[in-house]
Image (cartoon, helix red, strand yellow):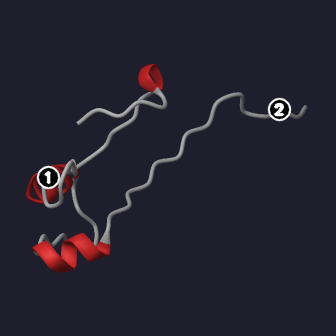
Amino acid sequence: MYAEPFYGESSFLMYRKDVFAEHGPTTPAQPTWQQVADVAAEADGAEKSMKGICVLDDDRAGSARR
């Protein structure tokens, strides 16, 4: 019997190295989600209209919230 999954999910974290280099937030190589949130708070507003973090979920796919 063969089957294919009908649902899959992948998660990743990306950031702008130029913002970190200019504004100084640092993060460990394998951060916890709390550490990610703390660094995002530091980056929030680093540039005009910049938000520190964007999290998407299934109910709001395609829309961002802070």
Q: Residue furthest right?
A: 1
Q: Is residue 14 left or right of residue 35?
A: right
Q: Which residue is mark 1?
A: 44
Residue at the top extreme of this rendering: 59
Residue designated by label 2: 3
For the N terminus, the image quarter is top right
Residue plotted at (16% across, 50% down): 37
The earlier-in-sequence mark between 1 and 2 is 2
28 in relation to 50, above or below: below
Crowdedness near tag 1: few (<14), some (14–19) or many (≥20) residues, C-alpha within 10 Å: some
Left or right: residue 31 compared with residue 13: left
Q: Is residue 25 above or below residue 51?
A: below
Secondary structure of the residue carrying tag 1 is: loop
Q: Residue at x 23, y 36 (%)?
A: 66
The percent position of residue 6, horizontal first and vertical second, equals 71, 28
Q: Position of residue 24 (x, y in %)?
A: 11, 75
Question: Please, which residue is most extreme toward the bottom here?
Answer: 21
**Image-quadrant location for residue 47:** bottom left
How far is mark 1 from mark 2, CA to CA? Answer: 44 Å
Question: 12 and 15: which one is in front?
Answer: 15
Question: Observer-nearest residue: 44 or 36?
Answer: 44
Residue displayed at 61% across by 37% down? 8
Up the image or down, 50 lies above or below 23; here it is above
| Residue drawn at the location 39% of the way across and 35% of the way down | 56
Q: Amino acid at mark 1?
A: Asp
Secondary structure under the numbered disc 2 in the rendered image:
loop
Q: Are marks 1 and 2 in contact (CB under 8 Å)?
A: no
- Label for residue 24? none
Question: What residue type is disc 2 on?
Answer: Ala
Q: Quadrant of residue 3?
A: top right
* Nearer to me, 35 or 63: 63
